[in-house]
Amino acid sequence: MSESETLAMSRMSRELKAEGHDVINLSVGEPDFFTPDAVKEAGKKAIDENYSFYTPVNGYQDLREAICHKLERDNKLSYTPDQIVVSTGAKHSIANTVLCLVNPGDEVVIPTPYWVSYREIVKMAEGKAIYVKAGIENNFKITPDQLDEALTDKTSVFIFSSPCNPTGSVYSKEELKALAEVFAKYPNVYIISDEIYEHINFGGKHESIAQFEAIRERVILVNGVSKGFAMTGWRIGYIAAHPEIAKACNKLQGQFTSGTCSIAQRAALKAMQADPSTTHSMLEKFRERRDLVLKLLEEVPGTKTNEPQGAFYVFINVKSYFGKSDGEKTIKDAFDFCMYLLKKAHIALVPGSAFGDDECVRFSYATSNDLLEEAVARMKKSLAELK
Ligand SMILES: Cc1ncc(COP(=O)(O)O)c(C=O)c1O
């Protein structure tokens, strides 16, 4: 397995910072906001109330009930608590699911650009990843024909995120319906629907592929509190799935980690019970920043992007810089491009190769307007020096 390239970039930028450089870190994958006060209070109360014992492997019953209530309230999806497994972050939920569903040699279809860990988790399960390229011309989304072409009788799982990390693309209800119609023709394929960015969606209502009855039993809905409630460090994610799949994940988790942290679960319960409007002020801030970054990038020659509809990233095509040089080193690919900007402009981005697209870089706007303005100004100046 490879080291997570996003974490590697964060590490390098921390090292430069430690040497005294003023680094602007745009490689981060987490909101720069604090966890809501009521959620923090619930965590403190849990400590005082001695929530210090082992928890049920699949999570506290009331938390799983609250997750079912949330899925009904926000997504009009009906689940029972035995269909929910709470884990140590959505990443853990995805790893559990892939390990349960993928046998060595199975094909796993993944649209590109993909979230970096899908590839490595599939490798861990000894699955064979089949990538389907979604280009900028189609807003980084795959078409039903592309999906139909990629699925075979060896496919066991399809995995995607909407809103997507790294592109911010969001599949509409119609687009999901068209994909669901293709899946209906392949009854052995499971669909892992990563919805961790549900609450950071600028287009309005979140749509889940689990809403289509014909494939519902085969959808494993993954979500959690990390992004929407600014709770990345608390480590709570969950799946909602067919009871047999939930049972398998429960069994696996029982041998690996046991139930996740008691305190974090009590805090997550508060987040689940919160009115969805709790997350709106953060959403509005992200929308404002997205608009700012898109406007600033228009002034940077040779960069191309789409208009992201969710998450907090812009995926920028920088191919026009490949082959250019600062007199010392020629930029061959997105990795060289990121290294150049890290060393020259002290800005940390993530090369698109981490997400399966080597022509692009990921720019996270989970930081203040002032830093975003400063970062793009530095980027523009340093790129102008490449010939
Ligand atoms: C698309 C996607 N899925 C899952 C995760 C993992 O979320 P968690 O922190 O809850 O494990 C991330 C985090 O970056 C993500 O971007």
Image (spheres, grey):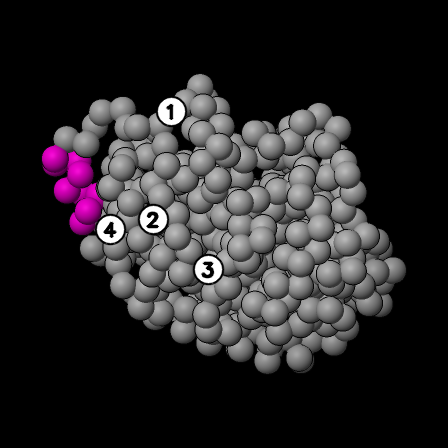
**Can you see residue 367?**
no
**Any mark on residue 198, and which?**
3
Gap in angstroms between the C-alphas marked 4 and 1: 22 Å
x and y percent of residue 335 in the render? Answer: 73, 50
Gap in angstroms between the C-alphas marked 3 and 4: 18 Å
> Of discs 3 and 2, which sits in the foreground?
2
**Any mark on residue 67, and which?**
2
Please state which of residues 185 and 288 is positioned toward the viewer in this rendering.
185
Q: Residue at x 44, y 44 (%)?
A: 240
Which of the two discs, 3 and 2, labels the residue nearer the N terminus?
A: 2
x and y percent of residue 241 in the render? Answer: 47, 42
Mark 4 closeness class: few <14, some 14–19, many ≥20 residues within 10 Å: some
Which of the two discs, 4 and 2, labels the residue nearer the N terminus?
A: 2
Residue that extends furthest to the right in the rendered view of this protein: 323
Going by the numbered disc 4, the residue's amino acid type is Lys
Residue named by callout 1: 258
Mark 2 closeness class: few <14, some 14–19, many ≥20 residues within 10 Å: many
Residue 295 magenta-highlighted:
no
Which of the two discs, 3 and 4, labels the residue nearer the N terminus?
A: 3
Which of the 4 quarters of the picture holds residue 315? Answer: bottom right
Please state which of residues 133 and 74 is positioned toward the viewer in this rendering.
74
Q: Residue at x 49, y 48 (%)?
A: 221
- Tag 2, which secondary structure? helix
* Residue 317 vertical placement versus 61 (above, below): below
Going by the numbered disc 3, the residue's amino acid type is Glu
Which of the two discs, 1 and 2, labels the residue nearer the N terminus?
A: 2
Please indicate whether residue 322 sits to the left or right of residue 122 in the image.
Answer: right
Please indicate whether residue 227 sits to the left or right of residue 148 in the image.
Answer: left
Gap in angstroms between the C-alphas marked 3 and 2: 14 Å
